[in-house]
Image (cartoon, coloured by chain):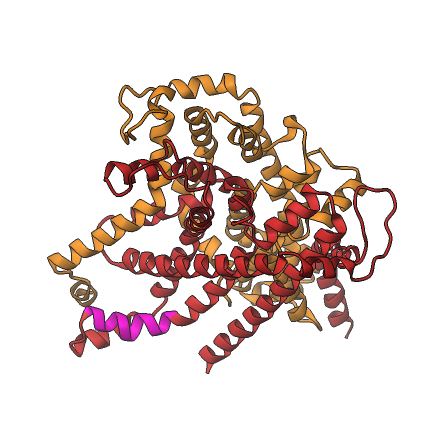
Chain colours: A red, B orange
Amino acid sequence: MSVRRSTFIFAWILLLPALLYVLVIVAYPLLDTFILSFTDASLKKTTKWVGTVNYDKIFNSTFAEVIIRTFVWTFFSVSIKMIIGTFGAVMLNAAVPGRALFRILTMPPWIVPMAIGIFMWGWMYNGQFGMISGMLQNLGLVDGPIAFLAHGSTAFWATIITDVWIGVPLVTLYLLASIQAIPQDLYEAAWTDGAGRFYRFRRITLPLLVPAMITMSMLSLIATFNSFDIIWILTQGGPNGDTTTMIIDTYRTAIGSKKYGEGAARAVVICIFLSIFCLLYFRVTHRLASGESR
Amino acid sequence: MSQPALINRYRWYELVGIYAGIFVFLSFILAPFVEGFLVSLKPLSLLFSSPYRFWPENGSFAAYRTMWVSVPGFARYIFNSFFISIIVTTVVLALVVPAAYAFARFRFRGSGALLAAFLAVNMFSGAVLLIPLFRLMRSFGVLNTYFAMIVPGVAFLIPSAIWLLRTYMMRIPRELDEAAFVDGASHFYTLRRVILPIAMPGITVVAITTFIGSYAQQFIFALTFNSKTEYMPLPVGLFAYFGRQEVVWNELMAASFVGIAPAVIVIFFLQRYLVSGLTAGAVKQ
């Protein structure tokens, strides 16, 4: 009994520093956001309770539009990441000479400081002299220069493409690891029975990859929903707010305009969405795990 | 032995298809780096001319020399980036090694829920919690210091680090702990003298991934909590130049390449660890 008790105490001593740290730096701010969202906190010295005014305000503004835009942006970004990532994983899994090198070459967007990758995209999208506009003109596909970041619709897609570019390496390498975890005997059995390569892919690889794809798209969904750096560096939410997602909107309100209370209300809405995603993720992965062990 | 070889034998058109697929895939991944590098070699007059030319005619490495003058804080930014990442990594390890051991070895009431709670931290980016974090940093009195970037940076790297190291530590045979315990070693002694040495490779992986994570993600806290040029990490330091009306693109790209050099070197030497490390964080055990 005393051994168990000392073990119990020891475990908590080990956990305590990390736990306290996260409580102070993450849990307390979470609570504080919630409290602030009912106040008119700003740079002023005094702060008073204002009830649900901040929430009324955001739902009377264009915030609904921002929410929809965020979902559309996230949906396309995650879908394209999954498609390109699956394609990349399948290609890199092929037993061809040079594949070790190809795998290394997949990593840079993920490993280099995110902001620096985004600077490079900033140049590529440059209207007057950038690579994409220039290439399209040289190929005769467009007549004049296109300033991708200056128009709403192109800026929207440009930020999505850059987000995809940063996210694809993780998706690819994760799915590649999952493909390689598929037992080789399955392929050999099918091969012995005369199944072709495409048939084996469709009937073995794809079905067994589905759990990993679901897990990854959930993780990707959460990360993409939180995406800030890309849009902030490329467009700061412009032009005319056409790339303003919930995170960008919150940042502008809270940090740009110093309206902490209003910003906090927006952050609470984001947290509610994230909590739903989070619960969904735990539930799905739990179900996948118990399904596997059966 | 011969079977896997046969099963993997490709016909010529399959090979062409695979290499074409890989080429398209890697073109997307590497295009910005190739273009960025070529831009760093081009003189400004060539950059700002129409029609667009991909190849740098009469290119030179001049921008790599002039950038040290035009971006006066450059060396300082790189130092700051390294300094912040090293401190962050050290603090994360100090917090995570004991916690991961506790999660790997001891089952106690609420341990599962606690682990889930740690992982849930991953779901919230710093951006969502920026307002209270700003107030918190202000009340600590650390705004515009290194701490304003280090303290929040650590918190968001803890969850994956715990997860990764816990997975590694669970593979260490339990008999080792028990043997030490039977011999009369205390819990703490067992951790320090038995587990830590064996777990070193795992700790190394966690250290590397944490370092990379912190080096790659120094943006939002540094942008919001620090306005002093002398403490800025590289991404924010360069962002100031990126935001200007007349961006000196060749120098910005040259600076970017010098800035990413450490990461690229790490990739080439440690990629084996990186893949196992960074993907294990996402794999549900």
**Looking at the image, which is closer to me, A135 or A103?**
A135
- Residue A41, x across and y down, in percent: 80, 49
Residue A14 in sight here: no
Residue B125 in sight here: yes
Task: Identify the magenta region.
Answer: A197-209
- Work out whether B188 lies above or below B34: below
- Residue A53, x across and y down, in percent: 78, 59
- Residue A145, x across and y down, in percent: 35, 36
Seen in the image, is A226 located left or right of residue A264? left
Seen in the image, is B71 located left or right of residue B2? right
**Looking at the image, which is closer to me, A244 or B277?**
A244
**Residue at x-position 31% and y-position 27%:** B50
Seen in the image, is A87 located left or right of residue A73? left
Q: Is-magenta flag for residue B97? A: no
- Work out whether B157 lies above or below A211: above
Total residue callouts: 0
**Residue at x-position 45% and y-position 17%:** B66
Q: Is-magenta flag for residue A202? A: yes
- Residue A217, x across and y down, in percent: 46, 64
Most frequent secondary structure within the magenta stretch: helix
Image quarter of the N terminus of chain A: bottom right
**Residue placed furthest toward the bottom:** A294
**Residue at x-position 18% and y-position 72%:** A196
**Residue at x-position 36% and y-position 48%:** A106
**Looking at the image, which is closer to me, B270 or B170?**
B270
- Work out whether B4 lies above or below A41: below
